[in-house]
Image (cartoon, helix red, strand yellow):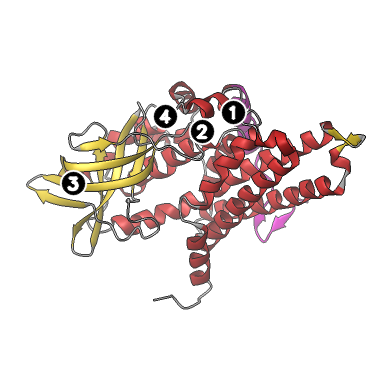
Amino acid sequence: MKPTIGAVDLDLTPEQEDFRKVVRDFAEREIAPHAEEWDRTHTFPVDTVLGMGELGLFGLPFPEEYGGAAADFTTLCLAIEELGRVDSSMAITLEAGVGLGANPIFRFGTEEQRQRWLPDLCAGRALGAFGLTEPDGGSDAGATTTRAVLDGDEWVIDGAKAFITNSGTPITSIITVTASTGPGEISAIVVPAGTPGLVVEPPYRKMGWHASDTHGLVFDGCRVPAENLLGERGQGFRNFLAILDDGRVAIAALAVGLAQACLEQSVAYAKERNAFGGPIGRYQAVAFKCADLAVGVENARTLTYKAAWLKDQGRPFKKAAAMAKLYATELAVTATREATQIFGGYGFMDETPVTRFYRDAKILEIGEGTSEVQRLVISRELGLPVET
């Protein structure tokens, strides 16, 4: 009899297990041997990303009519987890490309917009980005200062965005931008890459995710057709909040993959590293760290896949998404710190994967809503009073 949580089956289907193996094989063959070099040289590996597209990863949750695989959300999380186990940069490239690039087009676009942009996005021939965060905005995403004014049959956009993933790659095709289109009104508008007036600033110097593409954007009299409005006018921010719930589960899956990698690396090192006459894994100081990591990974995975399952069932999952994101990302930070401690001096050397994992982990507590925001969401879902 399979173990269950309520109606949640903890076993993956045979098809999902086969798919996980396919993605893991790809990650270990095409990504793992190069991840350290990409991190060191800050290289965005276009050919590898295109390979991810050929594997069908960017089209997983979308209908076949747009070139997708019509898979469930859990399957997408499996892919993100397996990539995160090897390289967070490639995992976030997939997560952002699907969740922030293509998903808004699918969820809120017209049929013409879907037919125009989704096939290339689903095939991984192109990447989409979402411009929400602003230099002075941060978690206060509703305080948008970017402006879009309708001039005849064109939107004229002026403003700036910050920390936008996949916004400046050679295969970036569109950037969906939130902008104020009137008093108290925030709308989403699709801006094709290369549009005059769109300035992609130089890449950031980041703590981690060195092989991921991240830029600031400036809009200076940037004109796009009026029909590039995505969704209803004035609903851009509300629509994005709906997208964000999906993204929180996906980020949690990335964090699970990263924590799993730390567990595997720590156990392997604890078996082979000798000190005081034997492997360090025989000492409780190390063994207990590994045991705690194992417990944390299982808890994070359960929370994450419960949230994904709720979404797949069409049930409310906002609180579950926030819980998964909060727990899994904080675990990932703890896991990388503990793995580095287990590796000792070698953990401080860039040639050791756990060093890269350590640098990559912190952003997980910030992006797609900080840990503080997740606690706010959870407390509101519990019915606690809203702070004014």
Q: CA distance from mark 3 to mark 4?
A: 28 Å
Helix, strand or loop under label 2: helix
**N-terminal of the two: label 3 or label 4?**
4
Q: Are marks 1 and 2 in contact (CB under 8 Å)?
A: yes
Marks 4 and 1: which is nearer the front?
A: 1
**Could you tell me the amino acid type at mark 1?**
Ala
User: Toward the viewer: 357 or 225?
Assistant: 357
User: Toward the viewer: 177 or 214?
Assistant: 214
Marks 4 and 2: which is nearer the front?
A: 2
Q: Around disc 3, counting alpha carbons within 10 Å, would you say few (fewer than 14), some (14 to 19), or many (20 or more)? A: many
Q: Which corner quadrant of the image does residue 324 belong to?
A: bottom right
Range shown magenta:
1-29
**N-terminal of the two: label 3 or label 2?**
2
Q: Is residue 13 left or right of residue 62?
A: right
**Could you tell me the amino acid type at mark 4?**
Gly
Tally of marks: 4
Q: Are marks 3 and 2 in contact (CB under 8 Å)?
A: no
Q: Which mark is residue 27?
A: 1
Q: Is residue 315 left or right of residue 261?
A: left
Q: Which corner quadrant of the image does residue 278 belong to?
A: top right
Q: Which mark is residue 179?
A: none
Instruction: Say which residue label 4 marks.
Output: 124
Q: CA distance from mark 4 to mark 1?
A: 16 Å
Instruction: Say which residue label 2 marks.
Output: 90
